[in-house]
Amino acid sequence: MKEYISELMGGKMPTLEDYKNKRVPDPDEKSEEEYEDFGKLICSWGESYTWMYKINHKGKKVYPLEILLNNTIRLSGDQMITGWLQHLSNTTCRTGNDINNVINDVKNETINSFIKYRYSPGNFIFWPCQGYTINKARGFSLAIRDRIDLTLNSLSRWEDSKNGNYSGYVYLGKRFDNEKEYLSLFGFKFKNFCEKFKLKPFLDDNGNVIDLAHSKLSLDSDGNITGEIITVSNNSFNGDFPEDYELYLNNAIIVINKRNELLKYLLV
């Protein structure tokens, strides 16, 4: 797997100090090479897609780029697992205070590993990018706080509710209702969505979404994810910052790297 260090960072990996001093671009921004490689990896479903380039007043391409899928669906890239590091310099917001309260107790090795792997294909996905999107909604939801595990569980609940198999509250339900053309690509099946995007590392053996804030994941001798696996439940949607932030980052590193392995064979 290629290592991607965005040209937006001048060819160097961001450091913790860069985040504290707000010298890091939006984490969803990529170089042209990164976006196109990620697009080939993750959108290689056989559907036709073309890149959409925005040109600024200086004649340069504007990032992030967008994909036009099947000539109708506009998608843009997103980092799935956030570390909230971009909030370190903003102590006036709730998240900024949360992360500043815990960051000094986390090993530098853990933080640096997460920073490195968050810029790899294993942490990348494409969402629709028109209007008030799934991606925006999950970021502004106080219950979800931009967590991909809670987002995926919400999508699973949405499918179950449509089939009459779930009567509880569905977070992001209205957003999924508004993206039926996109979700039709997967036959409105959560299982198909996960298969298309190679999201098996985010699921337990029964196809339930792993709670990345409370599980204690590890790898066995064969490289399979094991450990104390806790799946997402109603209690997961409490809007709290991960109580054990280092545990959350370590779990993120494990699932991102495992997904990178699943994407390797797609590289040309």
Image (cartoon, rainbow, N blue to C red):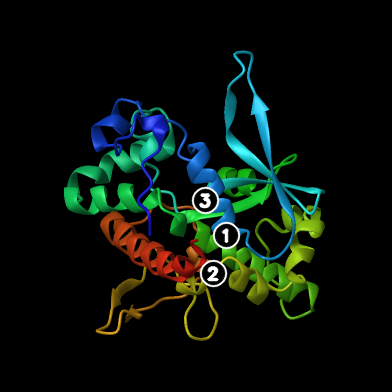
Query: In the displayed structure, does residue 72 sit left or right of residue 28?
Result: right
Nearer the observer, disc 3 or disc 1? 3
Image: 2 above or below 32:
below
Count of numbered tags: 3
Task: Identify the residue under disc 1.
Answer: 42
| Camera sees residue 107 | no
Image: 114 above or below 209:
above
Between the residue at mark 3 and the residue at mark 1, the CA separation in whole angstroms equals 9 Å
| Camera sees residue 123 | yes
Local SS, label 3: helix
Local SS, label 2: loop
Between the residue at mark 2 and the residue at mark 1, the CA separation in whole angstroms equals 8 Å
Residue 156 point in image, percent of width and height: 65, 71
Q: Residues within 10 Å of mark 3 (few under 14, many from 20)?
A: some
Q: Which of marks 2 and 3 is nearer the N terminus?
A: 3
Task: Identify the residue under disc 2.
Answer: 198
Residue at 45% over, 72% down = 201
Nearer the observer, disc 2 or disc 3? 3
Local SS, label 1: helix
Q: Which kind of residue does numbered mark 2 sit on?
A: Lys
Asked whether 42 or 19 is in front, the reply is: 42
Residue at 76% over, 65% down = 185
Quarter of the image for residue 244 reads bottom left
Q: Which of marks 3 and 1 is nearer the N terminus?
A: 3
Residue 64 point in image, percent of width and height: 57, 36
Q: Do the residues labelled 2 and 3 touch (CB within 8 Å)?
A: no
Q: Do the residues labelled 2 and 1 touch (CB within 8 Å)?
A: yes
Q: Which kind of residue does numbered mark 3 sit on?
A: Asp
